[in-house]
Image: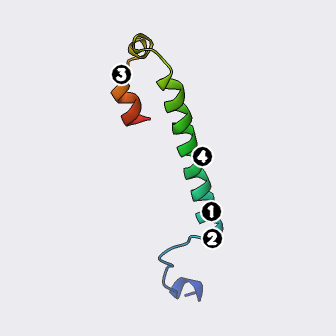
């Protein structure tokens, strides 16, 4: 049996860089949703209905 095989597995294999990347990606997703809400909020009710959304959907989903 090799030395490495006898060691317990690490419970978490996350580096500080992984945490920063995750935070950066979360911010990018948040900004994207904010931009989508901004664009959709400028559409009329008829335009929203054409794409299958309501005002409530815009505030709730995006």
User: In terms of image quadrants, where is residue 29?
Assistant: top right
User: Pointer 2: what residue?
Assistant: 16
Q: Position of residue 39 (x, y in %)?
A: 54, 26
SS under mark 2: helix
Q: Residue at x 38, y 14 (%)?
A: 49
Q: Position of residue 15 (x, y in %)?
A: 61, 71
Question: Can you identify the residue that label 4 sits on?
Answer: 28
Residue nearest the viewer, comparing 38 with 53:
38
| Within-10-Å neighbours for mark 1: few <14, some 14–19, many 20+ | few
Choose mark 3 or mark 4, whichever is in front: 3
Which disc number belongs to residue 49?
Answer: none
Q: Earlier in the sequence, mark 1 or mark 3?
A: 1
Give the CA distance from mark 1 to mark 4: 12 Å
Pick the quarter of the image with the N terminus.
bottom right
Residue 55 percent location from the top left of the image: 37, 24
Residue 30 vertical position relative to residue 2 in the rendered view, above or below: above
Determine contact: label 1, label 3, CB under 8 Å.
no
Q: Indicate which disc, 3 or 2, sits on the residue closer to the N terminus.
A: 2
Q: Determine the image quadrant of residue 2.
A: bottom right
Measure how far apart labels 2 and 4 are at the Cα level. 19 Å
Labelled pair 1, 4 in contact (Cβ < 8 Å): no
| Front: mark 1 or 3 | 3
Give the structural element (helix, strand or loop) at label 3: loop
Closer to the observer: label 3 or label 2? 3
Q: Is residue 55 above or below residue 12?
A: above
Q: Which residue is mark 3?
A: 54
Residue at horizontal 42 percent and vertical 17 percent from the top:
48
- Report the Cα–Cα distance between label 1 and label 3: 36 Å
Residue drawn at (51%, 21%) of the image: 42
């Amino acid at each position: 049996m090799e030395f490495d095989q006898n060691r317990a597995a690490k419970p978490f294999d996350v580096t500080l860089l992984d945490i920063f990347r995750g935070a950066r990606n979360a911010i990018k997703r948040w900004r994207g949703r904010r931009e989508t809400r901004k664009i959709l909020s400028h559409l009329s009710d008829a335009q929203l209905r054409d794409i299958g959304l309501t005002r409530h959907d815009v505030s709730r989903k995006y």
